């Protein structure tokens, strides 16, 4: 329908009367009220669309990244935030506070259910060649967190695939540089720690923005066809360890006992040697003293020594006969023991 009303020319003219213009529009267009209501609805819908696209929410374990026309502009923490509406800015949330897990050689059937997992179809991940050319089956898990969400989204095409590929490469390299017995028995913790360090270096080198929380070896076994032979080897190794422990126990019991006995004998010998030396020194000193006294009074010393010797001899004699040179016969027997007991001496 043609419209005859035209606005007044700009510059110098009188301002139009808006009320008159509305009245004229209503007279010329009877459905103007309905059109106005439709326009209000459109405005309300447009306002709702603009308002709903002007804010976003970041969860407590998340980090928000805002893109303006596809280009990264800022990061935001948990809470309610505003952005430019109508697709000018777009918000992406990344779970940076959650620990993720990747399983190798097996897959869990259901999270939170203990000891239930399937192993079929994953031998290509678990079978590895050791340094001594033995094949073993290694199952492990990698727990990680997204440390830098910008690198996680824009520096790597597929972060999960990168983690899996790098983890498998690191584990195969470590296992391939060790003997099979070490991997199966003693070096499991050391291998897990080394794998965590090496995997973190590679992830940092490729700017994945990932922090490795832990690497754990879940199960390390020989392949199923050789498991019976391996069990026999383990039994022999356990028996060897038991015998070594028993021998060590006997060693710890007998050696200290023998050392104590040897020390006692050495101490007794040293005491005996000290006693003999002291006695010999005493005897030598006594002899020297007697020699000095003899040199001073030789006659007295000779007589004393003679009397002491005769006293010892007569004490052991059964009978003593005293013969006078002037008498041809023998004197009666003297009871020398009684005389010695009464303190009387016998003189020649």
Image: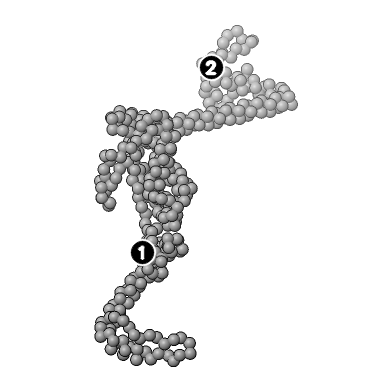
* Residue 8 placement (x, y as % from top left): 42, 87
* Residue 62 placement (x, y as % from top left): 38, 61
Q: Is residue 190 above or below residue 180?
A: below
- Image quadrant where residue 82 sits: bottom left
- SS at mark 2 in the image: loop
**Residue, disc 1:** 59
Residue 197, visible in the rendered structure: no
* Residue 127 placement (x, y as % from top left): 34, 36
What is the quadrant of the C terminus in the image? top right
Residue at left offset 33%, top offset 71%: 49
Residue farthest toward the right in the current orientation of the protein: 296
What is the quadrant of the N terminus in the image? bottom left
Residue nearest the viewer, comparing 203 with 261: 203
Which numbered disc, 1 or 2, marks the residue closer to the eye? Answer: 1
Residue nearest the viewer, comparing 236 with 208: 208
Q: Any mark on residue 79, and which? A: none
Residue at left offset 57%, top offset 18%: 313
Residue farthest toward the top in the current orientation of the protein: 328
**Residue, disc 2:** 317
Q: Is residue 278 above or below residue 61?
A: above
Left or right of 279 in this view: 124: left
Q: Is residue 30 above or below residue 89?
A: below
Gap in Å between the C-alphas at discs 1 and 2? 124 Å
Residue at left offset 74%, top offset 26%: 296
* Residue 157 placement (x, y as % from top left): 41, 50
Residue 256, visible in the rendered structure: yes
Q: Earlier in the sequence, mark 1 or mark 2?
A: 1
- SS at mark 1 in the image: loop
CB within 8 Å, label 1 to label 2? no
Left or right of 108 in this view: 185: right
């Amino acid at each position: 329908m043609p419209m005859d009303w035209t606005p007044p020319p700009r510059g110098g003219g009188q301002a139009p009367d808006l009320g008159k213009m509305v009245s004229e529009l209503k007279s010329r267009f009877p459905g103007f009220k309905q059109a106005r209501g439709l326009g209000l609805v459109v405005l309300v819908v447009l306002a709702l669309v603009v308002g709903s696209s002007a804010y976003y929410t970041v969860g407590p374990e998340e980090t928000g990244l805002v893109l303006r026309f596809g280009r990264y502009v800022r990061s935001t923490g948990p809470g309610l935030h505003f952005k430019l509406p109508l697709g000018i800015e777009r918000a992406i949330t990344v779970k940076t506070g959650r620990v993720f897990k990747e399983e190798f050689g097996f897959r869990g059937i259901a999270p939170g259910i203990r000891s239930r997992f399937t192993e079929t179809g994953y031998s290509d991940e678990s079978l590895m060649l050791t340094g001594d050319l033995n094949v073993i089956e290694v199952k492990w898990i990698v727990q990680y967190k997204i440390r830098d969400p910008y690198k996680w989204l824009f520096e790597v095409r597929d972060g999960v695939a990168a983690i899996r590929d790098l983890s498998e490469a690191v584990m195969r390299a470590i296992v391939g540089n060790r003997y099979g017995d070490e991997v199966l028995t003693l070096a499991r913790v050391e291998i897990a720690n080394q794998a965590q360090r090496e995997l973190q270096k590679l992830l940092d080198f490729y700017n994945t923005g990932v922090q490795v929380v832990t690497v754990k070896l879940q199960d390390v076994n020989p392949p199923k066809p050789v498991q019976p032979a391996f069990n026999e080897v383990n039994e022999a190794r356990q028996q060897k360890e038991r015998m070594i422990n028993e021998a060590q126990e006997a060693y710890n019991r007998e050696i200290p006992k023998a050392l104590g006995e040897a020390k006692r004998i050495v101490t007794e010998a040293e005491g005996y040697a000290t006693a003999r030396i002291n006695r010999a020194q005493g005897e030598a000193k006594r002899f020297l003293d007697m020699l000095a006294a003899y040199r001073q009074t030789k006659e007295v010393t000779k007589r004393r020594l003679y009397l002491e010797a005769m006293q010892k001899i007569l004490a052991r004699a059964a009978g003593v006969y005293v013969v006078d040179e002037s008498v041809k016969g023998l004197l009666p027997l003297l009871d020398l023991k009684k005389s010695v007991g009464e303190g009387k001496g016998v003189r020649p």
